[in-house]
Amino acid sequence: MASGSSLLAAALTLTTLAGCAGTEARVCPLIAVRQGIGITVDEAVAERVTAGELAVCWSGSCRTHTVVLEPSTRVVDEDCTGSGSDDVCAAHAEPTGEKSGFVDLPDMPSDPVEVTVRLTDPAGSRIVNQRLTLDPTLVDGPGECGGAGEQGRIAVDAEGTARAVR
């Protein structure tokens, strides 16, 4: 009679072979798309904002979510040591002055949602308090394994006006 470890090894081998039989290789980086709403706040407003929240409504239900706003950065290219494929190039992150955040909404629908954007200063005074309609977009994940999710994006401009962006 075969031992438990021998049976386990045989089962794993058969499972592996069955999974490979008749299929082509697929690129699956195991990276998923976050489903939810992102927000970017222009630097003219961002310097005064210390807290944010999004009230998101669909199907007759509303939920309020805290938005953690972090300083935004951009990538700045630096010099390369040469032009060959094995030469080294460098880059660094540099602050933009903006702030950005993301609210995860794993059950957000593909239909339009109503969003109220509230941003406050250190004293708790509202800088932005605006309601808008956001039409989520289906964003595909990388590779061939699916991982798509609905996302929306909101931008707050230098005058403190929030708008949905694509």
Image (tube, helix red, strand yellow):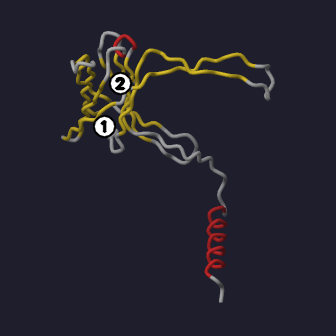
- Give the amino acid at mark 1: Asp
Q: Mark 2 = which residue?
A: 154
User: What residue is rendered at 25% in x and 16% in y?
Assistant: 127
Left or right: 53 in relation to 31: left
Of 41 and 51, the residue lying toward us: 51
Residue 108 x %, y %: 33, 41
Q: Nearer the viewer, residue 25 or 156?
A: 156
- At 23% from the left and 24% from the top, the residue drawn is 131
**What secondary structure is found at the residue carrying circle 1?**
loop
Residue 154 image point, x, y percent: 35, 24
Residue wearing tag 1: 111
Residue 96 on image: x %, y %: 48, 15
Q: Which image quadrant: the C terminus?
A: top left
Residue at the image point whose x is 36% and y is 14% from the top: 47
The residue most toward the bottom is 1
Q: Count residues near mark 1 (Cα–Cα under 10 Å), then give few for <14, some for 14-19, many for 20+.
A: few
Q: Amino acid at mark 2?
A: Ile
Picture quadrant of residue 126? top left
Which dot, 1 or 2, sits closer to the camera? 2
Left/right of residue 91 with respect to residue 130 in the rendered view:
right
Image position of 105 with respect to 41: above or below: below
Q: Whole-percent x and y of residue 39?
A: 37, 26
